[in-house]
Each structure stands twice: as structure tokens, then as C-alpha cells.
Image (cartoon, rainbow, N blue to C red):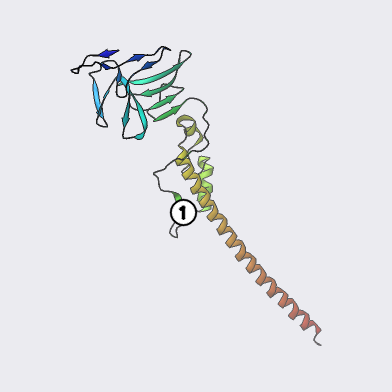
Amino acid sequence: MTTPTNMATPVERFRITSDGNLLMPIGAKFGVAMQDTFRYDNKMQPHYGLQWTMDSWTGSGPTLWTSAYGGMKWFTRGLSRFVLTGDGNIGIGTEDTKGFKLAVNGDAMFTKIKVKTYATWPDYVFSDNYQLPALRELANYITQHKHLPEMPAAAEVEKDGMDVAEMNRLLLKKVEELTLYIIDQHKQLNEQQATAKKQDEILAKLQQEIAELKKQPH
């Protein structure tokens, strides 16, 4: 299929091959309301359409650009399986992302996952001026609240879910605090053992002196 141009020879715009394939040249656009466009990477893209074009993102070949102002849905067996909202959020197995960038309703498997946290990583626990909570205060808090300080309660997690990055940060903090408690207990145990050894030595010396005194004639 061709369209007339101001050139002597019409330019081919669209082809249906003998085996039923549809061919369009790179940069050709397909969609509705083709005049409703936006500019991206110095090229025009329809709000409701798609095109294959070369852009600055990759030089390995044409990139598929597709756009829908209200969002996109992918279906299998008559059911919505994957959605991309107009705000750029992705839903897999659900159309309600609840405002999150990615919402998955179902199981997911990863070979590797990396979570970037913007909170302070708790190495400050090992600084010299860190105030480690007293064990008595910690025990009182656990007795009253039935969970560790700063950690969410079971009811809160059941209602709102769990922030993986924040939970890992808090767990590391508690492990580091526990390590300090163990080091302190070990230090106290060593001091007690050293004191007990000195007392044993004094007691042995006193017993020896008493034995020597008993040997002396009256």
C-alpha cells in the first residue's frame, strides 16, 4: 500500500505479505487519534498508538514504543493478567496497585533481589556513644507490648504488610544490639572468673598458713 507524495514515485507505507504478515517501515505509527501526540527523545509519539523507532536508549535496533493515556491491560483466557496504570504502576494478578509501583497478587520467585534503602544502616549501634537499652528496661517493654522495641506488632503486619528493607534494617539493628549484650555478658563472666580465681588463691594461701600454724608446737 502506498501514499502519494510530492515525489514522482509513490512511497510504500504498508505491506501484507503472501503469508499474511504485516510490514510497516521503521518510524511508522499505528493507533487512533494520531494527531494527539507528545514529544519524546525528539520524536513524536501518539498518546494512543505504537511505533517501532530508533531512539537514544539503545543502538542495537528499533525500539517498540507504545502508549495509552489511561493505562494498559493484557488478557489471557478472558481475564486481566497484567496492568499498567496511567500513573505508571504495574499490577500482576490484580488491577488495584493501591498506589504502589508494583503490586503482585500471587507467588513470585526470584534468583536475586536487591532492595535499596534510603534509611540509615544501623552500624551506628557499634559507635562508642550509642546508648544500649538496659536489659531491665527491655524486659519491661517486652512484658508490656509482647514484641521488641521499634519492631511492628503482629496485628500491624497482618493489616498493612511488611516493608522488607525496613524490616531487614531493624533486624540487623537487633542482632547488633544482641551482639553487644553477649560481649558485655562475656566480659562480666571473665571478670567474675578472674575474681573467683583470686579468691581461690587467697583461700588456698590461708588454708596453707592455717596448716603451718597447726604444725607449730604449743
Front-most of residues 148 and 168: 168
The C terminus - image quarter = bottom right
The N terminus - image quarter = top left
Q: How many marks?
A: 1
Looking at the rendered structure, the secondary structure element under dot 1 is helix
Front-most of residues 110 and 57: 57
Q: Is residue 182 visible?
A: yes
Q: Which residue is most to the bottom? A: 217
On screen, residue 48 versus residue 131, left or right, reads left
Q: Is residue 149 visible?
A: no
On screen, residue 194 versus residue 116, left or right, reads right
The amino acid type, in three-letter code, at marker 1 is Val
How far across and how far down the image is residue 27, in percent?
29, 24
Q: Residue at 46% x, 45% y: name it.
A: 169
Residue receiving disc 1: 125
Q: Residue 127 sits in which quadrant? A: bottom left
Q: Residue at 40% x, 15% y: name it.
A: 21
Q: Residues within 10 Å of mark 1 (few under 14, many from 20)?
A: some
Front-most of residues 37 and 54: 54
Q: Residue at 39% x, 30% y: name it.
A: 101
How far across and how far down the image is residue 55, in percent?
31, 32
Q: Which residue is most to the front? A: 8
How far across and how far down the image is residue 25, in percent?
32, 21
How far across and how far down the image is residue 45, in percent?
27, 24
User: In the image, is residue 123 above or below residue 69?
Assistant: below
User: In the image, is residue 215 above or below residue 78?
Assistant: below
Q: Residue 198 sits in which quadrant? A: bottom right
On screen, residue 3 versus residue 190, left or right, reads left
